[in-house]
Image: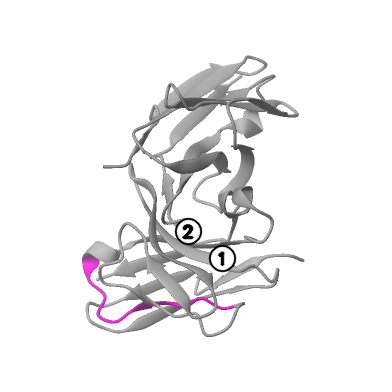
Amino acid sequence: GQSLEQPSEVTAVEGAIVQINCTYQTSGFYGLSWYQQHDGGAPTFLSYNALDGLEETGRFSSFLSRSDSYGYLLLQELQMKDSASYFCAVRHRIAGGKLIFGQGTELSVKP
Amino acid sequence: EAQVTQNPRYLITVTGKKLTVTCSQNMNHEYMSWYRQDPGLGLRQIYYSMNVEVTDKGDVPEGYKVSRKEKRNFPLILESPSPNQTSLYFCASTQTGTGISGANVLTFGAGSRLTVL
């Protein structure tokens, strides 16, 4: 089957750096995306990796290694407002409109 | 303002009573899709549409129907709701004309919380 695995919870302190991993057992997909969701609100797009390597957007960076079936989201200079759920997602290469999401990682930022 | 609008935001209904959750986007996006979110299960795709009159099943289509008669609207229909369809539902859209990456950058609606008794 096709699935993405993420840790269910991560805790870090304000100002720190945290890495949220995403491993997948999905063959044939277009890139890896990351979304943020606060308290059951609308998920919002954070980052996308079409190719292997690191993509940086402000305090957030995302990494993809297709050979290792692995990616991660890196959050730097953590702020309290970063407390949220984070989802990785891939788009199926054959069924191009089919998206698969991980189960989400709940990040708690402590003072 | 560019947005995806879902209605209703909250609904409590009873088993078997047909209901429709509407979804409308004002961004001229070709691609639209529906997801349900349940605790510990993340977002699971119900149906998606690559363009007008083109719809396909996602991972959990059972018990749901969709239609795409116009580009801006993509309603989700529950013909005979059951308690296991109690969930938080999200509609999302994206532009696909800009290449491979387009379908990964979704704009989500605010969500519709449905309870089936």
Verify whether residue B78 appears in magenta: yes
The one of A27 and A3 positioned closer to us in this rendering: A27
Residue A7 placement: quadrant: top left
Quadrant, the N terminus of chain B = bottom right
Q: Position of residue A16 (x, y in %)?
A: 63, 14
Q: Position of residue B44 (x, y in %)?
A: 37, 53
In the picture, the disc for residue A64 is none
Dot 2 amino acid type: Gly
Identity of the residue drawn at 33% across and 39% down: A3
In the rendered image, which residue does mark 1 sit on?
B31
In the rendered image, which residue does mark 2 sit on?
A97
The one of B105 and B91 positioned closer to us in this rendering: B105
Distance of label 2 from label 1 (alpha carbons): 8 Å
Identity of the residue drawn at 51% across and 76% down: B74
Q: Could you tell whether A87 is left or right of B64 in the image? A: right
Identity of the residue drawn at 33% across and 67% down: B115
Compared with A111, B78 (above or below) is below
The one of B97 and A4 positioned closer to us in this rendering: B97
Residue B72 placement: quadrant: bottom right
What's the image's color scheme? one colour
Verify whether residue B74 appears in magenta: yes
- At mark 2, the secondary structure is loop
Q: Position of residue B94 (x, y in %)?
A: 61, 60
- At mark 1, the secondary structure is strand
Mark 2: few/some/many CA within 10 Å (<14, 14-19, 20+): many
- Dot 2 and dot 1 residues touching (CB under 8 Å): yes
- Magenta stretch in the rendered image: B73-83
The chain holding disc 1 is B
Mark 1: few/some/many CA within 10 Å (<14, 14-19, 20+): many
